[in-house]
Image (spheres, rainbow, N blue to C red):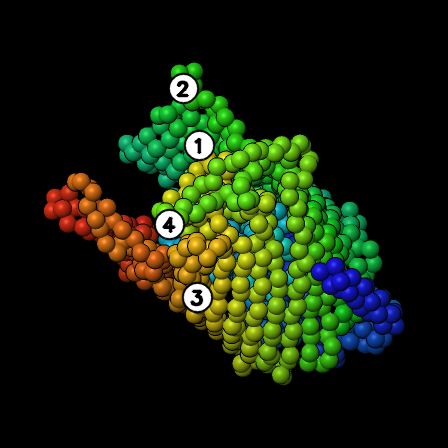
Amino acid sequence: MNTFKQRCLPAFFLLFFTAVAFSQEKFTLSGTISDNSSNETLIGANVYIKETETVAATNQYGFFSISLPAGTYTVEISYVSFGTITETITLNQNVRKNFQLSSSSEELQEVVITANQQKANIRTPEMSVNKLSVQEIKKMPVVMGEVDVLKSILTLPGVTNAGEGASGFNVRGGAADQNLILLDEATIFNSSHLFGFFSVFNADAIKDLKLYKGGIPARYGGRLSSVLDIYQKEGNSNEFHMTGGIGAISSRILAEGPIVKERGSFLIGGRASYAHLFMKLAGEENSAYFYDLNTKLSYKLNDNNNLYLSGYFGRDLLEISDSFNNIYGNAVVNLRWNHLFSEKLFANMSLIYSDYYYGLELDFVGLNWDSGIKNYNFKYDLKHYLSDKFKLNYGLNTIYYDFNPGTIEPSGEDSDINPDQLDKKYAFEPAIYIDAEQQLTENLTVSYGLRYSMFYRLGAQDMNIYANNQAVVFNDDLKIYEKATPIDTKHYGSGDVIADFNNLEPRVGIAYKLNDEQSVKASYNRMAQYLHLITNTSSPTPLDVWAPSDDYLKPQTLDQYAVGYFRNFKDAAYSLETEVYYKKIKNRLDYIDGANLIANDAIEQVVLPGKARSYGLEVLFRKNTGKLTGWISYTLSRTEQQTPGRTPNELGINNGDWYFAGYDKTHNLSVTGSYELNPKWSFGAIFALQSGQAVTYPNGYYQYGDVVVPSFGARNMDRNPAYHHLDVSATYTPKPEKKKGWQGEWVFSIYNLYNRMNAASITFRQNEDTGANEAVRLSIFGVIPSVTYNFKF
């Protein structure tokens, strides 16, 4: 391993200095691209040089840089749903020029923009990446009229969830805790409101969304399956505007405007649900509601320096008969500084605080419970535009974790509960990375990178010591796994290193352009994950506890391979993306039968390390232009897990055989479409069809006295019924020509049009009247109509 490190790092530095030498004879065109009406920078806007067919895209802050030989060039600037700017620029010195695009609804311009966007996808080695614009998301039918960012990504290939009303999502057979969810670079640990009915992301405040399923750049780390990178708007620095919506069970409002015109802006938005108020009026003792707040301040110090302060705060509250209160939610703050060292070197420094809190009040037992996870993150990222054919990203990222598994307090003087504090846990995760994108020939482009991550499990804590270093033992007589009894404990003081790990995480991608309309791509990436979500459900719940790696909970590692074919048709009016992938995971935790996860201060006693694998085929076909647009996505996949015995005498979990993971979905089909009838009326529809969730049904029963006890066979050998539904929506804009003052629209939607009663779960019981065994289906949603009024001024 050391030899590998010694060879890798000098190779990157050699490439760096070689590229610098070649770039010195060229001149650079650089600048930012923004929205003319708001000064909002545009992420992923295209810069196309006709003479050299060079394509560049703006970064997360709207900046671009292209180095070219001296000469005169035709430059096209474009972005989806905006007009195209074409300028002739002479490069005989470095040129810094900012461009502003105007929003356009002319169909011809949209065709040109879409074509340029798809050509960029053909050329770059980026694959296994999906992007959705906020305009696309807002056209989709949703539950109860609330636009939902997370529900929208379920229409993409390789993405599923555990069913209706389930929080989290699964990517290419990965568990929900293997997704890194970022809002303005800050980690979101729980992405759902109301236990999965809504996401925490207010679509009015969102600027850009990008989902990485594979080929993940080296700047990202800490999770295995995917990265969902979401950026908030910066706010309008030209004039004040408000946007909002009034729905059946929730409403939202967002305000934005200049602090200093054309230099500084603010954005503040909030959402709240109020269905619980009607429940109270109807005499219902139970209620559930949420509220959240998005905010951002942006200020341009000068042409080379920008400051951003962004935050999010959200809470969910569940009350049951005044005896059970549950509060949970996220809070994040991020202070960022963008600095332009030169026309070729862009830097971003971030200081980030993230806090996920979970609180529980049980008045009937006199108990208050608090738990959560906090992290403090410092990031410094640099992007080096060395030439038109060579770009470098490099930087560092450090995270300090503070885990609180549980604080127990009596809720009153008459409570019998004794105060207790489960051992707090601390960890430190630093990483450095370097990433390169290089065009080797006219048709061949590669990206390659290396991330070196480290993890230190820190004290203060008393750690259990077990015989043979095994926290789980196998009972040979009963053929079951049991908790081991500690033989001793070892005290670690504050800051002492309890365990440490490090991993080299190489990434590589390659794109070969067959012609201007088609290409083939391949990628490989290795990832390491040092955090574990302790849960016994297929969908995350607020009560789940995050735990750091240590001597018993080893870090998870992943190797993923993917190959794809990409094709545009009829000048990118249609596009096709197909990929096959294979991924394998080491040290995936599996739970012994009868594992108790709640308030367990020795979680290592109920888990065993296993492995997982997933493989599949993904197809995405898009119609990009015309009145009817949309896409069809299909995934054929398999996801399995295995935990063999540690010795020949041990049976392992499920007798050591491979079994379907709880989130395995063999077939996943989604059809998404939107149709613009005229400027006043537009329509949308989504049809979703998935294989049923893998579950374990009883395979027999035996009687113990008067009680009938079910017996179970192999894990997850059965499936719930297939999951499918059709959602439709219609949007009516009374005055589409009105661009100033009050502008409103009505959104009518029907979720689950044909009232499919999908099974959230199936339970088995004995009928009290007949004594017969029966299966009972639990369904959450039937048909749900809704009306929402959206406005802006």
Amino acid, disc 3: Arg
Q: Is residue 614 left or right of residue 392?
A: left
Q: Which mark is residue 415?
A: 2
Between discs 2 and 3, the one toward the N terminus: 2
Amino acid, disc 2: Ser
- Residue 153 vs 321, above or below: the answer is below
Query: Mark 2 against mark 4, which lies toward the viewer?
Result: 4
Between the C-alphas of marks 2 and 4, the distance is: 41 Å
Q: Which mark is residue 360?
A: 1
Q: Which residue is mark 4?
A: 479
Label 3: element kind: strand
- Image quadrant of residue 670? bottom left
Label 2: element kind: loop
Q: Residue furthest bottom?
A: 515
Label 4: element kind: loop
- Residue 401 vs 733, above or below: the answer is above
Q: Which mark is residue 296?
A: none
Between discs 1 and 4, the one toward the N terminus: 1
Q: Which residue is mark 3?
A: 638
**Is residue 743 visible from the viewing direction of this image?**
no
Between discs 2 and 4, the one toward the N terminus: 2
Q: Is residue 80 left or right of residue 724?
A: right
Label 1: element kind: strand
In the rendering, at what x and y percent does residue 649 appear?
Answer: 43, 54
